[in-house]
Image (cartoon, helix red, strand yellow):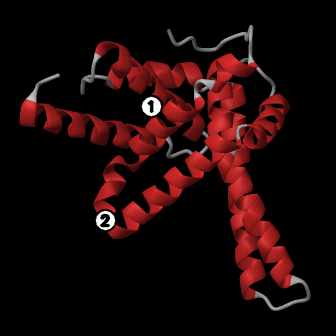
């Protein structure tokens, strides 16, 4: 990586390109989790070997490796669940009926629970060979057990949302920032909770 101003520009260009790759590979929706996993793997490679904008081939190879049946199905389930809960919250807020306020509160609560399960889902899909039911169940429990990490991720999402509202320019690197947050905050939990996992991906 270059130093000085050129180095800063190269780093920014790399994050923008990585964001574009994440967006492009997530267009089918069910490929969202494999694309995010590939993004995190590229960041791990940068950590080991240094940042470089020449990663398109590596990204594609990583995506193909992580685009297995479990990750694709979980992507579809997670996105569908998020949409249903968002629609439920909207319906509860706009339609006047008995207990609509209670329904709205529970819809919003479950929406955020489902949203914050995503980082736990991703790191397990990347590194542990589990069934879909096992990944979802473990992610739900880890959400509460690792409440400090969960709260930190919520804070990251809030700051990212506020940053985008104040400066839409951040959108061009938002996916990269989201991925690096998951990589930094959640990846270490695998070695804590899985002593001898059948690993899909080993980070050294």
Q: Decide: is 127 above or below 100.
A: above
Residue 80 visible, this angle: no
x and y, in percent, of residue 160 in the image: 44, 56
Q: Residue at x 77, y 59 (%)?
A: 110
The residue at 78%/88% (across/down) is 95
| Secondary element at image label 2 | loop
Image quadrant assignment for residue 97: bottom right
Tell me which corner region of the image, top left, top right, bottom left or bottom right, holds residue 165: bottom left
Q: Name the image quarter holding the N terminus.
A: top left
Outermost residue, left direction? Answer: 5
How many marks on residues? 2
* Distance from the alpha carbon under mark 1 to that under mark 2: 23 Å
Disc 1 and disc 2 in contact, CB within 8 angstroms: no
Does 155 appear above or below 36? below
**Is residue 57 among what the camera can see?**
yes
**Residue 167 — which label?**
2
Work out whether residue 38 or residue 69 is closer to the camera in this orientation and state it.
Answer: 38
The one of 56 and 101 positioned closer to us in this rendering: 101
Q: Where is residue 57 in the image (x, y as percent from the top left)?
A: 35, 20
- Judged from the image, the secondary structure of the residue bearing numbered disc 1 is helix
Pointer 2: residues within 10 angstroms few (<14), some, or many (20+)?
few
Q: Badge 1 local density, few (<14 within 10 Å), some, or many (20+)? A: many
Select label 1 or label 2 by which is in front. 2
- Which numbered disc, 1 or 2, marks the residue that appears first in the sequence? 1
Residue 39: give its label. Answer: 1
- 35 left or right, relative to 58: right
Q: Position of residue 184 (x, y in %)?
A: 49, 31
Residue under the point 40% across and 26% down: 43
Instruction: Identify which residue is drawn at 81% across, 38% down.
Output: 141
């Amino acid at each position: 990586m270059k130093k000085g101003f050129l180095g800063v520009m190269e780093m920014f260009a790399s994050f923008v390109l990585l964001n574009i790759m994440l967006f492009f590979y997530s267009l089918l929706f069910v490929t969202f989790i494999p694309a995010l996993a590939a993004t995190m793997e590229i960041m791990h490679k940068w950590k080991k070997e240094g940042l470089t904008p020449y990663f398109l081939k590596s990204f594609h190879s990583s995506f193909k490796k992580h685009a297995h049946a479990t990750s694709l199905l979980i992507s579809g389930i997670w996105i569908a669940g998020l949409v249903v809960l968002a629609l439920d919250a909207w319906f509860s807020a706009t339609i006047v009926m008995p207990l609509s306020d209670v329904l709205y509160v529970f819809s919003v609560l479950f929406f955020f629970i489902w949203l914050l399960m995503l980082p736990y889902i991703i790191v397990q899909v990347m590194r542990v060979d589990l069934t879909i039911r096992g990944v979802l169940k473990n992610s739900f429990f880890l959400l509460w057990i690792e409440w400090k990490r969960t709260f930190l991720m919520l804070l990251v999402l809030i700051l990212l949302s506020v940053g985008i509202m104040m400066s839409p320019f951040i959108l061009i690197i938002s996916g990269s920032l989201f991925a690096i947050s998951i990589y930094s905050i959640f990846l270490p939990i695998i070695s804590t909770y899985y002593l001898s996992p059948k690993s899909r991906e080993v980070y050294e």
